[in-house]
Image (cartoon, rainbow, N blue to C red):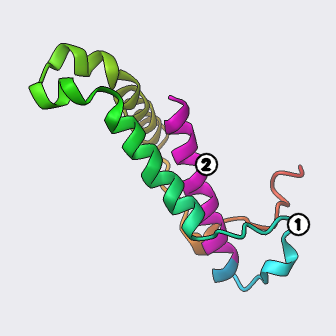
Amino acid sequence: TGFIAWIGIALSHFRFRRAFKLQGHDLSELKYHSKLYPFGPVLAMVLCVIVIAGQDIPSLLSLNWSHMAMTYFSVVLVLVLYLGFKFVNHTKIVRLKDMDVSGAESAR
């Protein structure tokens, strides 16, 4: 589950920086500058997916469904909760041009 959280963090960082530039901001406005962007968040996402998938390779190769269910239950749970929230609350993914990158919303 920790690696799933890190995928979310890396994806959020990647989308924030893209939205920040798209909305006409300059990177000098940011207090922290990630030197490895965009390579860093993309690498983090790829490595997290590899670690998650590689947790139980023997059960994947032998198609041992009961072991795979136990090993990868958190992935299914996160997907069900995320999609369930989206369905119940009728929310959509915020487009990059519509993101609040100013921080004004969080300061309230």
Who is closer to the viewer here, 69 or 105?
A: 69
Taking the spot 39% from the left edge, 36% from the top edge, the residue there is 52
Q: Which residues are magenta?
A: 1-20
Mark 1 vs 2, N-terminal side: 2
Q: Is residue 49 left or right of residue 58?
A: right
Q: Is residue 55 left or right of residue 41?
A: left
Give amino acid for label 2: Ile
Who is closer to the viewer here, 66 or 83?
A: 66
Identify the secondary structure beneath mark 2.
Answer: helix
Taking the spot 50% from the left edge, 28% from the top edge, the residue there is 1
Q: Quadrant of residue 41?
A: bottom right
**Mark 2 burial class by Cα count in 10 Å: few <14, some 14-19, many 20+:** some
Q: What is the x, y in percent for residue 91?
A: 50, 48
Taking the spot 85% from the left edge, 80% from the top edge, the residue there is 28
Q: Which mark is residue 31?
A: 1
Residue identifier under label 2: 9
Q: Quadrant of residue 49?
A: top left
Q: Looking at the magenta stretch, what is its main secondary structure? A: helix
Give amino acid for label 1: Lys
Q: Is residue 76 left or right of residue 97?
A: left
Q: What is the x, y in percent for residue 103?
A: 82, 60
